[in-house]
Amino acid sequence: MKNNKKVLVIIPAYNEALNIEKTVEDIRKNAKGVDYLVVNDGSRDDTLDVLKKNKYNYIDLIQNLGLFGAVQTGLKYAVEKDYDVAIQFDGDGQHQAKYIKSLVDEIDNNSIVIGSRFVTKRKPFTMRMLGSRLIGFAILLVAGIRIKDPTSGMRAYDKSTMADYANDINNPPEPDTLAYMKLRGKKIKEVQVEMNDREFGESYLNLSHTIKYMTRMLTSIFFIQPFRKRK
Amino acid sequence: MRLQIILIVASLATFIYVILRIKKHQLNIDDSIVWIIWSILLLILSVFPGLPTYLSKLLGFESTSNFILTGFIFVIYIMVFLQNIKISELKEKNKKLIQRLSIDKKKEEENNK
């Protein structure tokens, strides 16, 4: 990869025994020259066995921490191992490794690069995308940046941003922190990617979870992020 | 008068209860200070009922019981919020510990290769 940057792809995995092999093999095959790290977030299925059997590179969390804690563990590892770029990548087969290169290519001039479904493609008017629009609009109002796919979980961070996400207690890898990073003057860019639908396992998208998520995001973007310290 | 005695007994009981918990090592001294001060305050209020009546008039409450209830609820709010902060801190420390242990375990395995 360009300039011999050290790139670490962080794959949080919670009960992903059925998807994780495909995800890692995809990265090995379609994103040559990058390292990957699976963070097993206390899975209760055979995820750990699959990781061991294939001799994958992984961290096994001794307790379940949730998505935030799992990604953050990977970021801490990346900081300590002196990586230049860290990429957050879903373990459930939604993200495609062939787009990793385009994220890395853009990181030279940006702090955060988002793998976005809607840079060149139009966002469909579905209920699911209504939430995405609301969050996008909130970020636009507060931080003055139009992010077309704020809920995308495929993101690349440069070295200093990586450390911010690794060490701050209030920087979960969620859309609300994008507003904060923009307010702090970090450059954020989106590149077009495609995503797959989940093949196995259930996603979190039920009504009560969606309401909780939206309430948390909007409250955070409007009432918390603008008032945080911008060192 | 009877109410006053009940209040005095209740505040003394609170005080003794807190002290006993400390003796049994269920509560550390730092966390108990606020409860001890609180029970002493209750005791003062029940021994001198004129005091809350005076304060309540001074602040413009219609009745002393309103003043007492408002005051107590306010104190409880603060206590709950402070506990919430403590819980956040504990969660964060707990998370850091889990991450540190897990990363170190990983690094150890790398070094043994």
Image (cartoon, rainbow, N blue to C red):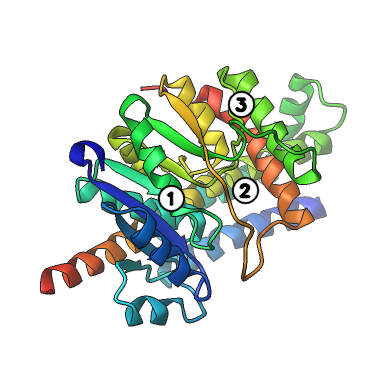
Q: Looking at the image, can residue A38 be seen?
A: yes
Mark 3: amino acid:
Ile
For label 2, the residue is: B43
Q: Is residue A84 left or right of residue B61?
A: left
Query: Image quadrant of residue B100?
Result: bottom left
Q: Nearer the viewer, residue A128 or B13?
A: A128
Q: Which label's residue is closer to the chain start, 1 or 3? A: 1
Q: Is residue A51 left or right of residue B63?
A: left
* CA distance separating discs 3 and 2: 53 Å
Residue A50 lies, with reference to residue B41, above or below; the image says below
Residue A64, position in %: x, y? Answer: 47, 67
Mark 1: amino acid:
Lys
Residue at position x 81%, y 50% from top?
A: B1
* CA distance separating discs 1 and 3: 28 Å
Query: Image quadrant of residue A30?
Result: bottom left
Q: Quick check: marks 1 and 3 in contact, CB under 8 Å?
A: no
Residue at position x 57%, y 17% from top?
A: A144
Q: Which mark is residue A98?
A: 1
Residue A231, position in %: x, y? Answer: 35, 22
Residue A131, position in %: x, y? Answer: 73, 39
Mark 1 element type: helix
